[in-house]
Amino acid sequence: GSFDPVTLGHLDIIRRASGLFDRLIVAVMHNQNKKPMFSVEERMEMLRRTTADLPNVEIESFGGLLADFDNLLVDFAASIGATAIVKGLRATTDFEYEFQMALANRKLNADLDTVFLMTSSEYMYLSSSVVKDIAVHGGSVAGFVPDEIVQDIVRRTRKED
């Protein structure tokens, strides 16, 4: 995912997925078509801080100029020996898009499964876009993102004013 920034919904899925797998690699995507609030390195650092208590979680990046492989998630997964992709779902609209992506990924790599985890109901409305919109307009993002990164968001949105 982009994790720009990581939300409590993301963290919920990461925590639950870490209990399902011996090793969980959270892949931070570099998308050249988007202008993120935080750099890939900053997003990785924020994820490392917020998952520090999860010993089987690793943070990596993929895509774009920062990687030695194609932008495709299946290529990244193959390069690290992954057997599954975990995707969080908030609503049926997420499912339709992610199901299409899962089928395409399966066609590209028949050995790679996609595991869908439903978000906890308390986070169904939550997205990084919502968090950024709140922050840019001066609202408090506490309760939307992990406590460890609230000040990162506040500092960044004040810089852009």
Image (cartoon, rainbow, N blue to C red):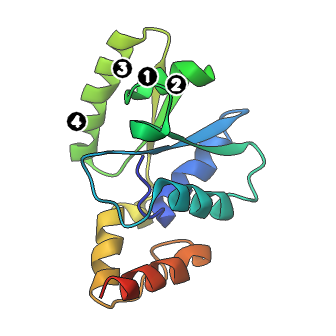
Mark with earlier residue (4, 2): 2
The amino acid at mark 1 is: Val
The residue drawn where x is 32% and y is 91% is 138
Residue wearing tag 3: 105
Are the residues at dot 3 and dot 1 in contact (C-beta closer than 8 Å)? yes
Instruction: Kindly tell me whether residue 48 is visible in this rendering.
Output: yes
Are the residues at dot 4 and dot 1 in contact (C-beta closer than 8 Å)? no
Cα separation between marks 3 and 1: 6 Å
Q: Position of residue 125 (x, y in %)?
A: 31, 65
The residue lying toward the viewer, choosing from 25 and 90, is 25
Q: Nearer the viewer, mark 3 or mark 2?
A: 2
Residue 77: numbered disc? 2
Residue wearing tag 4: 96
Mark with earlier residue (3, 2): 2
Image quarter hosting the C terminus = bottom left
> Around disc 1, counting alpha carbons within 10 Å, would you say few (fewer than 14), some (14 to 19), or many (20 or more)?
many
Residue 74: numbered disc? 1
Cα separation between marks 4 and 3: 14 Å
Are the residues at dot 1 and dot 2 in contact (C-beta closer than 8 Å)? yes
Specify the farthest residue to the front.
65
The amino acid at mark 2 is: Ala
Q: Is residue 69 above or below residue 133?
A: above
> Around disc 2, counting alpha carbons within 10 Å, would you say few (fewer than 14), some (14 to 19), or many (20 or more)?
some
Cα separation between marks 1 and 2: 5 Å
Q: Nearer the viewer, mark 4 or mark 2?
A: 2
The residue lying toward the viewer, choosing from 95 and 159, is 159
| Residue 106 horizontal side relative to residue 133, left or right | right
